Structures are given as structure tokens and as C-alpha cells.
Image (cartoon, grey):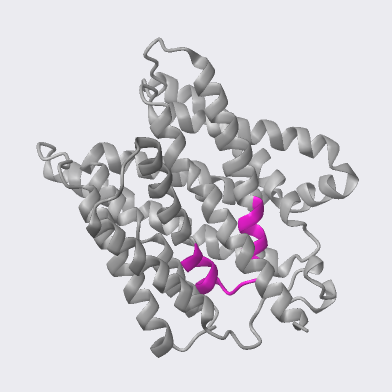
Amino acid sequence: MPTTQQRIRSAGLGAGVVAGLVWGLAFLVPELLRGWSAVTITAGRYLAYGLVSSILFALGGAALRTHARRHWRPAVHFAITGNAGYYLLMVLGVQAVGAPVTGIIIGCIPVVIAVVGNLVVRSHPWRRLAPPISLVTVGLLVVNVLEMTGSAPNAGAPAMVKVAGIGCAFGAVALWTWYAIANARFLDRHPDVPDTGWSTIVGLATGAVTLAALPVAALTGQLSSTGQDPGPLVIGSLVLGIVVSWGGTALWNTASGRLPPTTAGILINVETVSGFAYVYAARGQWPPIGQLAGFAAILLGVVLVVRLRTGDRTRRRPDGGTDPGTASP
């Protein structure tokens, strides 16, 4: 029979893979909502996330309200770093230096989390971690470089604007890396906070941050509309807010609380592969052979990391079968 740690790790791996499959929808929905600005779609997503979180919070009872009072500061930090602030920097990067360059930089997030995570929590020897990380890195470069074929960056932008845009893209990578590792440590240190409850609390904070940013977005002309039927935008926002943001965050919390940061970080690559797969399926096309090879390298790297033994560093959460009092400090 599997041991308690094996069951915890299996639950974390399953949640991480499903989270990636769910997050991949964030690639597809904007593809189906062409004509609406990226900021409008994102505002709809995070407002829907905040709305469903407020409903669940109202139904969550005294325990959830207690957790919110105790941990509202990290919830706001994670709302900014993992959602609003990260996306703002990404958009600024796209506007300044172009989507292809920004996409390549943003695509490094799983590798950066894996490396930084192993520095923070040494779960794997570097000599065993090097081959899968190399495979994932090469795969990401192949996929993104081929994706930018025929789509040139902002070649006419001033040099300082390009430098600022690249800085914003790297800032987005830094923010989400900090969020991923800090969120995992928070869950490790607070095993009494349920995964879904924490997604709800962070969703409340994200909704509040989004509401506060709406006037700025409106004044700067980011909430553009082409006079289209708002129905698809509302449906897409609900899918992004409820399924992708709330559901994906809850699943990510489950994975983060049960896996070392390195393993959880590498699993984010499932989002990249599934996102491209959804988009190509919606277009009725097959990816180029080169991209298929890149996807294969990424998935092989993910499999190799998953197969690595983590020793006793599997994380513990109360619903994983371990007494909350034994959780790691």
C-alpha cells in the first residue's frame, strides 16, 4: 500500500497537472474574444474571480472569515504579485518591446521557479536536476522562437522604451516567481488554511485590487471596445474568473502545499503545452513539426522531474492524511 507521503505527493502531482490543464484555457479564451483589448479581458477575469470569491466567502462561515482577518496582508500581496501586478508588467512589456520577446521571457517562469525553488528548498541534487531543466529550457525556446516567426517586435520603438519593456517582462517573471514560492511557504506554514478557502481569500483581494485599478485603466484608454456584443465577453470572463482563476488557484494551492517548489514549478509547463494545444485545436490546425518537438522536450523534462525522488521533503497538508501539528515550519 502507498505510504502517507506517497499519497500526499500523488495528490500534489495530480492537482498540479490539472491546474496546468485549467490554466491553459487562459490562452484559448482571449483567442475566442478577438476584438476586445487584453486589459478588458483581464479586468473581466479578475472581477469575475472577485465576484465568485465574495459569494463563496459569504457562504464560508466563521472559520473562513477568521482566516481572512488573520492573513489579509499576504492575500493582498499574492493578489498583486500573482495576478494584477504580474499582468500589468506583462502588458507593459508587450506594448514596449512586442509580444514575441515578452513571451520568450515570460516563458522562462517554470525554469526560474524550479531553480530558485531548489535553492530555497534543496529537494534534488543539481546534477540530477540539470538534464530535465535543460530539456524544458530548450523546448520552451524552440516553441516560443517558432511562435514569433512572422511576428516582429516593436522595431521602431526608441532604445530606452525597449529596455524598459524588457525590464518589465523580467519584472513579471520575478513577481510570479516570488508569488509561487512565497505562496507555497505560506501554505506549508499554515496547514489549517484550506486550499479552496485560500483561493477564495486571494480572490477577494484580487477583485478589490482590480476595482481600484479600473479608473486608471479607463483614463488611459485600456478598456477599449469595438462595439461588439458583450455576451461572449461576459461568458469568457466567467470562465476565466471561476474556472481558470478560482479553480486553477485552488488546484495550484493543493500542488504547492504537497510538492517541493522545484517540482511544482516544472509542472507549470503543462499550462504552456495545453494552452498551445487548445489554441491550435480551436484554429483547426496542427502545430509545426518544430513546435511539436519543443512540446515533446518540455513534457519529457516534466516527466523526468516528476520521477525524481524527493526524500523526506514532501510537503504536508491536513487533508493529505497528516496531523496538521506535524507540518514543516
Question: Residue 195 lies in magenta, yes or no?
Answer: no
Give the camera-side residue of 70 and 183: 183
Q: Is residue 9 above or below residue 173?
A: below
Give the camera-side residue of 302 and 226: 302
Q: Position of residue 59 (x, y in %)?
A: 85, 37
Question: Residue 261 lies in magenta, yes or no?
Answer: yes
Q: Is residue 174 above or below residue 235?
A: below
Q: Position of residue 87 (x, y in %)?
A: 43, 42
Magenta span:
250-267
* Location of residue 96 by image quarter: top left
* Location of residue 19 by image quarter: bottom right
Give the camera-side residue of 205 and 312: 312
* Residue under the image location 70 percent in, 79 percent down: 6
Q: Position of residue 255 (x, y in %)?
A: 63, 64
Residue furthest right as drawn? 62
Give the camera-side residue of 106 and 136: 136
Q: Which quadrant would the N terminus be assigned to in this image?
A: bottom right
Viewer can see residue 82: yes
- In this rendering, would 253 be left or right of 62? left
Viewer can see residue 209: no
